[in-house]
Amino acid sequence: TQSQTAAATAPQPPSAASPPAAPPAATTLADARAAATVVPVAAPSPAAPAGPLTDRQIVDKANAYFNGLSTLVADFTQVGGDGRRSTGRLYLQRPGKLRFEYAAPSNLEVVADGSSVAVRDRKLATQDLYNIGQTPLKFLLRDRVTLGLDIRVTDVDRDPSGVRITLEDRSTIGGTSRITLYFDQGVETLSQWRIVDPQGFQTTVVLSNLDRGRRVDQRLFVINYERMLDVR
């Protein structure tokens, strides 16, 4: 019964006839000292600081950055070899789609739709078309970026502000272009690039307010092949 079960499981008082339990044997002085001694646990050694990235690791991380990039929206400042500055907004959707939307007073737009690159002048209503494989922006547009294979790496440099990778592209319009990519120390973010075209003219593009993974309106990448761009 329930009362029997409770009685069976309840602790029983010591019997009056039973002698009290003997105290445990006295410990020796050595045992007491051993019990009282706290053995310190060694704290884990801090991880050794990672050494600087090798040239190969820097190039591999740059390739991983581009190949992991789906979309990017950023403000840009463009500086020409003559010191002239332009600003605007960059829209990128990899692979193949890009738009540089220049702010006034510039009248330019540069649009890549996956197969061609159009350079538009809104004021003059002109549009020049180029094959996408002839532009020096392959590092942004290709489906699979493999710097060092499809584009030759000529130099990797480091300074306190970050790392620089210099490329040589022999397939651009007019001959060979030299491209320098600027990353942070960890090669996690592209901050700018500089292009020296076959004629020696230098253009630097600096990015700010980068927004990765943002959804981009596909109408931004449309090239009108049928007619000249209307004057706005």
Image: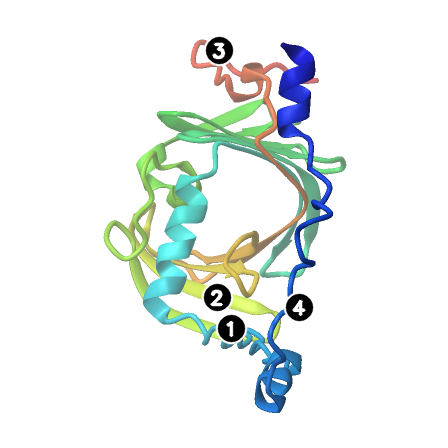
The kind of secondary structure element at disc 1 is loop
> Do tag 1 and tag 4 residues touch (Cβ < 8 Å)?
no
Label 4 vs label 3, nearer the camera = 4
What residue would you read off at disc 3?
Answer: 227
Q: How many marks?
A: 4
Instruction: Look at 44% across and 9% down and name the residue there.
Output: 226
| Residue 13, image quadrant | top right
Cα distance, mark 3 to mark 2?
41 Å
What residue would you read off at disc 4?
Answer: 23
Amino acid found under the numbered disc labelled 2: Arg
N-term mark: 3 or 2: 2
Amino acid found under the numbered disc labelled 4: Pro
N-term mark: 2 or 1: 1
Residue 14 position (above or below residue 131): below
What residue would you read off at disc 1?
Answer: 47
N-term mark: 2 or 4: 4
Amino acid found under the numbered disc labelled 3: Arg
Residue 79 position (above or below residue 154): above
